[in-house]
Image (cartoon, rainbow, N blue to C red):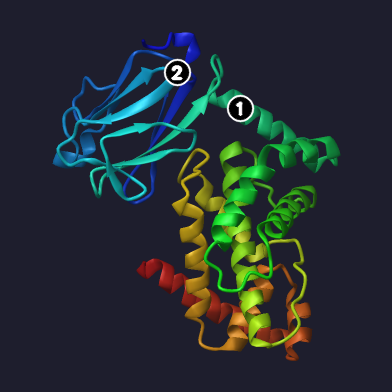
Amino acid sequence: MKATARQLPGLSVTVISPEGDLLNDHFFEPQDSISIGRSSESDIVLADFGTKISRCHAVILGESGSWEFYNLGVNGSYASGQKVDQVVLTNGAAIRLSKHGPILHFKLLAPGERPEEADHEISGWIRRLRDGDEDAAAQIWNKYFDRILEIAKRSLKHSPARVTDEEDVAVLAMNSLLMGIKEGRFPELDRRDQLWRLLMVITTRKAAAAIERDLRQKRGSGEVRGDSAMIAPEFEDSILKGFDRIDGEYDSPSWPALMADETKELMRILPDETSRQLALLKMEGHTHEEIAEKLKCNVRTIERRLKQIRELWSKRLEDD
């Protein structure tokens, strides 16, 4: 028997282009069905993608208290790279329509809740934390720590040397976020989707840095230093500029792992061990002066090497 409307959560659907651009958002109160396709009569109209998308490519039905996605398109639908015909939608689920078509991101909201209400709560915590309210810090910690712990676990899963565990990484990531907000280091941060993505970035970078430190320790190349608990300022703008590209709390298991892998790959393409050590120290939040002292060179050399690393990474990312 179908669930009654009040038993279903509200559903927020964000449409992302194949290039990663945010196209539009849709919000649906609990109802019997949502149609998705090229037809102008669809609830979510995707007329700009040609025959990649069928006239009626998919429907979403409220079944037994859950939203369920059903593919109807001839080019298929994909979740985590696997073709799917039916998916029970969870908060943060992502489905691509056809192999190279748009991506749908889903958020489940409590009955009667609107998307802006959830964002308002997080925005309030961020503002209060900037004013020094420790209760707001505790609210953010309680809401996100378990999720970040899981992200850290996934990111460290394939590390060949597990000196650091996922709880260490999660604690460092949360401390980095909270300290950064209190110190005003993320002035553009004011929404839930931004907060989540910043946490994802910090956590996966902490995990990648931990893996690199563990490998260096295993090779016997020096003492392992504790994390400085702050993300490097040079990365802040690029992180925040990317927030508006994809809305929603994307909890796909593959995303943090891919991000950690990409960070390790960026470290791998650096020309020598000194460059990798310099990049790692900067990712951990050391100042140029601290890095220069540690590597026994002058600050101008550090600045020049960092510029070379940024150029190399930017080219790699553009090529990708």
Tell me where residue 48 appears, x and y as whole percent: 22, 38
Q: Which mark is residue 65?
A: 2
Q: Residue at x 73, y 86 (%)?
A: 222
Label located before the other in sequence (2 or 1):
2
Horizontal side, residue 20 vs residue 185: left or right: left
Q: Residue at x 37, y 48 (%)?
A: 80
Residue 59, compared with residue 15, is above or below; it is: above
Q: Residue at x 32, y 50 (%)?
A: 81
For the C terminus, give its image quadrant: bottom left
Tell me where residue 281 appears, x and y as whole percent: 68, 75
Horizontal side, residue 112 vs residue 233: left or right: left
- Residue carrying label 1: 118
Observer able to see residue 219: yes
Tell me where residue 267 appears, x and y as whole percent: 53, 76
**Would you identify the image quadrant in which residue 113 lies?**
top right
Identify which amino acid the numbered label 2 is placed on. Gly
Horizontal side, residue 87 vs residue 45: left or right: right
Residue 259, compared with residue 70, is above or below; it is: below
Q: CA distance from mark 2 to mark 1?
A: 21 Å
Q: Residues within 10 Å of mark 2 (few under 14, many from 20)?
A: some
Q: Residue at x 47, y 53 (%)?
A: 255
Q: Are marks 2 and 1 in contact (CB under 8 Å)?
A: no
Identify which amino acid the numbered label 1 is placed on. Ala
Residue 243, compared with residue 119, is above or below; it is: below
For the N terminus, give its image quadrant: top left
Q: Nearer the viewer, residue 128 or 75?
A: 75
Q: What secondary structure is marked by label 1? A: helix
Tell me where residue 129 appears, x and y as whole percent: 79, 40
Outermost residue, bottom direction?
296
Q: Residues within 10 Å of mark 1 (few under 14, many from 20)?
A: some
